Amino acid sequence: MDQLVAHQRAQDLFASVLADLTPDQLQLPSPCSDWNTKEVVEHVIGGNQWVQELAGLQPGALPDDLRAAHAATAASAQAVFGAPDGLTREFELPFAKMPGTDFIGLRTGDVLTHAWDLARATGKSTDLDPELAVEVLAATRSRLSPEFRGPGRPFGEQRPCPADRPPADELAAFLGRSVD
């Protein structure tokens, strides 16, 4: 799957799950253990702004509405990756320097996984874009090294996932979330 298409699909999917989030659900705990649902949304918005910052751009002021803030930052992140050098330029992350082709994959997986977190926290279906989830899972399996797993690290240990569950559940379990 084209990386720009995959990134846009993940952002669109996140937006669709976010569209159903009600104000009374903003404080619900999420499967991302340190964050409630509002903090998950803010993380994705912040990640989109981070793409701009790492590209040397100044993110614009955010609308107060979370949906509008996500839409604006998602479009800006997509524009960075869609620029003529967006997939070839080097991005200096705290843990590695990587080309845009790797960074967009990281962001796509992050956005898809957090869409899953929101869906799970709010009792919605976690059968999210199976084709995209299969692609992201394959990329994540090849990229995620053991030093990023465990207490105090970005990902937990892989959890079990029944074979009959959707690919997005399999991705979530691979990243340390309980799918039971």
Image (spheres, rainbow, N blue to C red):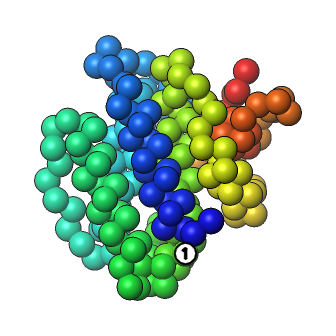
Give the residue displayed 32% in from the left and 20% down from the top. 22
Does 83 appear above or below 26? below
Mark 1: few/some/many CA within 10 Å (<14, 14-19, 20+): some
Image coordinates of residue 63 in percent, x first then y, are: 15, 44
Image coordinates of residue 148 in percent, x first then y, are: 66, 54
Residue type at numbered disc 1: Thr
Image quadrant assignment for residue 69: top left
Give the residue displayed 59% in from the left and 38% down from the top. 128
Does 68 appear above or below 160? below
Q: Is residue 91 left or right of residue 147?
A: left
Q: Nearer the viewer, residue 167 or 99?
A: 167
Image coordinates of residue 97 in percent, x first then y, are: 52, 77
Image coordinates of residue 25 in percent, x first then y, are: 37, 18
Does 107 appear above or below 94? above
Give the residue displayed 69% in from the left and 61% down from the top. 139
Q: Is residue 132 left or right of residue 62?
A: right
Which image quadrant: the C terminus? top right
Which image quadrant: the N terminus? bottom right
Give the residue displayed 20% in from the left and 68% down from the top. 58
Count of picture labels: 1
- Outermost top residue: 24
Image quadrant assignment for residue 167: top right
Q: Nearer the viewer, residue 97 or 40?
A: 40
Residue 75 in sight: yes
Where disc 1 sits, the SS reads: helix
Q: Nearer the viewer, residue 153 or 169?
A: 169
Does 121 appear above or below 146? above
Q: Is residue 70 left or right of residue 36?
A: left
Which residue is the site of mark 1? 101
